[in-house]
Image (tube, rainbow, N blue to C red):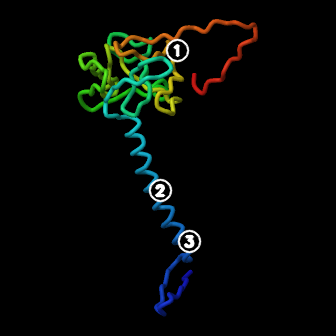
Amino acid sequence: MEGKHHRTDGSELVITGLPWTRVVAVIVAATLGVVGFFAANAGAGGAARSSGTVSLRKTSLGMILVAANGHTLYLFGKDRNDKSACSASCAQFWPPLLTRGKPTAGPGIEASLLGTTKRSNGSLQVTYNRHPLYRFLLDKRTGQTSGEGLFKFGARWYALSAKGAAIVKGAPTATTSTPTTTSTSPYP
């Protein structure tokens, strides 16, 4: 099948084998595929790596550790001896704060408490006061602390103070006898 299309200047453009609209569709699809591939790889790299900078930020929990983007950093109660116990699906919901070199202390952070630990895949995770640091996937805004005190993947998650200690939010006191509701969680 051969199709002919005329240009406005009078010259002929001959496309052999496919109608012009199908050729354009294939070119557009290929271009979008390449753009999508590079965007996905850039996004995955950005999610996996950070600048390794740790700072302090005032939140509803007080002054807490945050990543360079202002998102809350958490410790995992199951971690022991500077080693992460969060991998696979746990690390998808609680991405470790990774770095390629020495982490940087932002304002209010004691540089001597910053360090790294090697994860099972060989990447370097930032630690503070010997606690591997994580972000929480559902914290979408700076200063948000929705992971505070959650019991997920076998232990509790807590934001950290400038000293590197868990900030344990006090349990609210019940003043009414209304039944509590259980929220549905998007992960195990």
In the image as oriented, which residue stretches furthest toward the right? 178
Q: Quadrant of the C terminus?
A: top right
The residue under the point 23% across, 27% down is 102
Mark earlier in primary sequence (1, 2): 2
> Which one is closest to the eye, mark 3 or mark 2?
2
Above or below: residue 187 compared with residue 174: below
**Front one among 94 and 15:** 94
Assign a secondary structure to mark 2.
helix
What's the residue type where badge 1 is placed?
A: Gly
| Residue at x 24%, y 30% (from the top left corner) | 101
Circle 3 or circle 1, nearest the eye: 1
In-image side of 146 versus 104 (left or right): right
* Image disc number at residue 161: none
Q: Position of residue 138 (x, y in %)?
A: 53, 29
- Residue identified by numbered label 2: 33
Q: Nearer the viewer, residue 87 or 45?
A: 45
Residue 129 picture location, percent across and down: 31, 13
- Tag 1: Cα neighbours inside 10 Å, few (<14), some, or many (≥20)? many
> Which callout, 1 or 2, points to the residue nearer the camera?
1
Which residue in the protein does label 1 denote? 149
Q: Which mark is residue 22?
A: 3
Residue 107 x, y percent position in the rendering: 30, 25
Could you tell me if the residues under marks 1 and 2 are in contact, i.e. CB atoms within 8 Å?
A: no
